Image (spheres, rainbow, N blue to C red):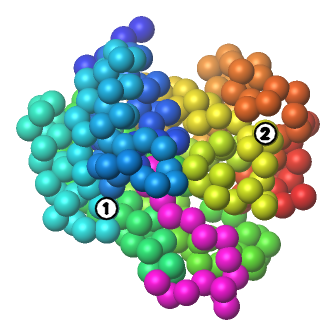
Amino acid sequence: MAGLKGKTLLITGASRGIGKAIALSAAADGANIAIAAKTDKPHPKLPGTIHTAAAEIEAAGGSALALTVDIRFEDQIERAVARTVEAFGGIDVLVNNASAISLAGTLETPMKRFDLMFAINTRGTYACSQAAIPHLLKSPNPHILNIAPPLNMDPKWFKDHLAYSMAKYGMSLCVLGMAAEFRERGLAVNALWPRTTIATAAIRLLEERVKEESCRTPEIVGDAARAILVREARQCTGNFFIDDEVLAEEGVTDLSKYAVKPGEELAGDIFLDEVPDGVRAYGT
């Protein structure tokens, strides 16, 4: 199956973590990847830049375009979209992956941090989608995929980190609204969220809550994303997918290869109530 061969993906936050894993999974098909991220030069605490990601994508079989983009600024988004179209002739997929996190209570969240999360998570997702949609609508199988959770209104998901929950759910609301808005025009808009915590740089900054050995690797989200993005857009929109459920639909049920430490009990991710065997509830 050709999969994503020749397709063009614009992925925000693709210099590391989940965004890069999605890029590499698509690259293995021979896709074109526009990497839209801030890290142009090495970060003192975080691994990877847009240039190292581009090299990995090309080594995996894809074509890469490294773009320095801060999605808080729509002029940078518009420039990135224009450069992607110029380089590859269009856009078939937008992955809204870039995100900011702070799991702090109301009194412990400075307004500067509140504004950052809303500017990147909610506003950034909306702005990237708005800029890319005119080009996506020209694709024969256009997809937007937001790395965002299902909308769960249980107060327990708000009481300890209200600002983050609101900002992250803004990405989920974009799925709910845009899927309905563009359904008749053939644009798929879906969300994807991991069942367990994922071993990314963000988790390493939160080690008091989650140990890395209790995580899965970003590759599980990358492989699940690819499985969604090859589906027929008109038949696959408005969904809030969970990574292991997507892979199970593809016949992949042995997920041991994705464990950071095989055999270790896994930590369930935030916003999910269902806890399968071998996974402990978030925060326990």
Image position of 79 (left or right of 38): left
Residue 193: % across, % down: 61, 47
Q: CA distance from mark 2 to mark 1?
A: 31 Å
- Tell me residue 255's x, y (percent): 74, 24
Camera sees residue 240: no
| Residue most extreme to the bottom | 107
Q: Which residue is labeled 2 in the image? A: 213
Whether residue 172 is visible here, answered yes or no, is yes
Q: 72 or 232, which is in the foreground?
A: 72
Q: Where, by quadrant of the figure, is residue 108 drawn?
A: bottom right
What secondary structure is found at the residue carrying circle 2?
A: helix
**Which span is picked out in magenta?**
97-112
- Secondary structure predominantly adopted by residues drawn in magenta: loop
* 105 part of magenta stretch: yes
Identify the residue at the far top of this view.
Answer: 1
Query: What percent of the width, then of the height, locates residue 29?
Result: 38, 16
> Which residue, given by chain and number where applicable, does mark 1 sit on?
71
Please tell me how crowded label 1 is: few (under 14), some (14-19), or many (20+) other residues with Cα within 10 Å. many
Q: Depth check: give the residue in front, 41 or 247.
A: 41
Residue under the image location 16 percent in, 36 percent down: 90
Q: Position of residue 144 (x, y in %)?
A: 38, 45
Q: Amino acid at mark 2?
A: Glu
In the displayed structure, 41 sits above or below 86; it is: below
In this rendered view, identify the residue nearer to me: 55 or 187: 55
Q: Could you tell me which quadrant the N terminus lies in?
A: top left
Query: 264 above or below 27?
Result: below
Q: Is label 1 in a helix, a strand or a loop?
A: loop
The residue drawn where x is 46% and y is 84% is 112
